[in-house]
Amino acid sequence: MARASIRSRTNRRERMLSLTAGIVAHRGLHNNEGPAPENTVPAFQAALDAGFAIELDIQMTKDKKVVVVHDENLKRLTGRGLLVQALFFEDLRSLKICGSDQSVPLFSEVLDLAGGKVPLVVELKTCRDREGLCSRAAALLDAYDGPYCVESFDPLTLRWFRKNRPEVLRGQLSTHYGKDKVKKPGILRFLLTNLLLNFLSRPDFIAYNFEHRNHFGFRLYRKLFAPVTAVWTIKNPSDQEIARREFDIVIAEWA
């Protein structure tokens, strides 16, 4: 595979670095044991109040509403083993997150709340209706007056943005798929772990799992191409200190 086909788009490096300087609050500045659980309005408001950039996750409901929630299955968040994509939005809205009084917000509501005050890092979750999620999210972002970038574990999602919204900064999320025991075919785990499908996504930055930051494939990629790099997810002050020395962008749950 040609070197140019898997390298990140370093010609847009300065835009990327200026977008997310400092700490990015993972799923908002949240506490799942308190009144501001992850990916909820209070968590995002807390991040806004602290001046942090915000990372958030989007999916689509059965009635094609773009919502802000991380898990495909809601068991961890609500105690009920329901799939986001199988629920109508009004049914999803009735469920409470982590025992709080908060529910899953619409992406449009979060965009209204953010109002361009801080940068947004929008993760598009892998889903069956990739085209639908990408096109609906892009339409909402087209109307948003503020700095943002998109990211995904799915290279095909990023390829959609590459073709349909080439001006939008995009990031390839990755991890060590084998060690994390992700249920994918072995060859696909290898390709994704080692960023060998970047010829599809042509990312502006790479966001890698902090736990696996020393994996040979990721270190080799960094050495060859010197991409803008983000690291996720930092959960304590000592790891944050390491991350801020070694990476351009720090996505953290501790700040």
Image (spheres, grey):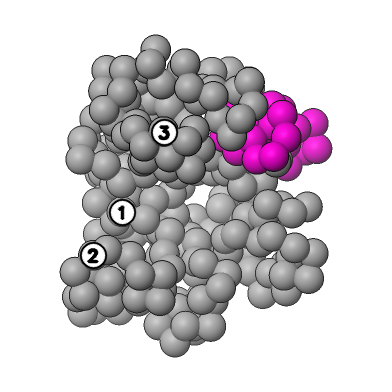
In the image shown, does 196 or 81 lie closer to the viewer?
81
Residue on which disc 3 sits: 80
Q: Are marks 3 and 1 in contact (CB under 8 Å)?
A: no
Q: Disc 3 marks which amino acid?
A: Arg
Q: Percent x, y for residue 82?
A: 34, 33
100 relative position to 169: left or right:
right
Residue 37 colored in magenta in the image: yes
Which residue sits at x=41%, y=33%?
80
Q: Are marks 2 and 1 in contact (CB under 8 Å)?
A: no
What numbered label is drawn on residue 162?
none
Classify mark 1: helix, strand or loop: loop
Residue on which disc 1 sits: 154
Above or below for 115 versus 198: above
In the image shown, does 14 or 26 lie closer to the viewer?
26
Which residue sits at x=38%, y=25%?
66
Residue extending furthest front?
Answer: 79
Q: Total number of numbered labels?
A: 3
Where residue 250 sits, quadrant-wise, is bottom right
Q: For the residues marked 2 and 1, what is the alpha-carbon distance in whole angstroms?
A: 12 Å
Which residue sits at x=31%, y=23%?
87
Query: Which residues lie in the magenta part?
Result: 32-52
Q: Disc 2 marks which amino acid?
A: Lys
Q: Which of pointers 2 and 1 lies earlier in the amino acid sequence? A: 1
Please tell me how crowded label 2 is: few (under 14), some (14-19), or many (20+) other residues with Cα within 10 Å: few
**Which label sits in the foreground, 2 or 1?**
2
What numbered label is drawn on residue 184?
2
In the image shown, does 197 or 37 lie closer to the viewer?
37
Please tell me how crowded label 1 is: few (under 14), some (14-19), or many (20+) other residues with Cα within 10 Å: many
Q: Disc 1 marks which amino acid?
A: Asp
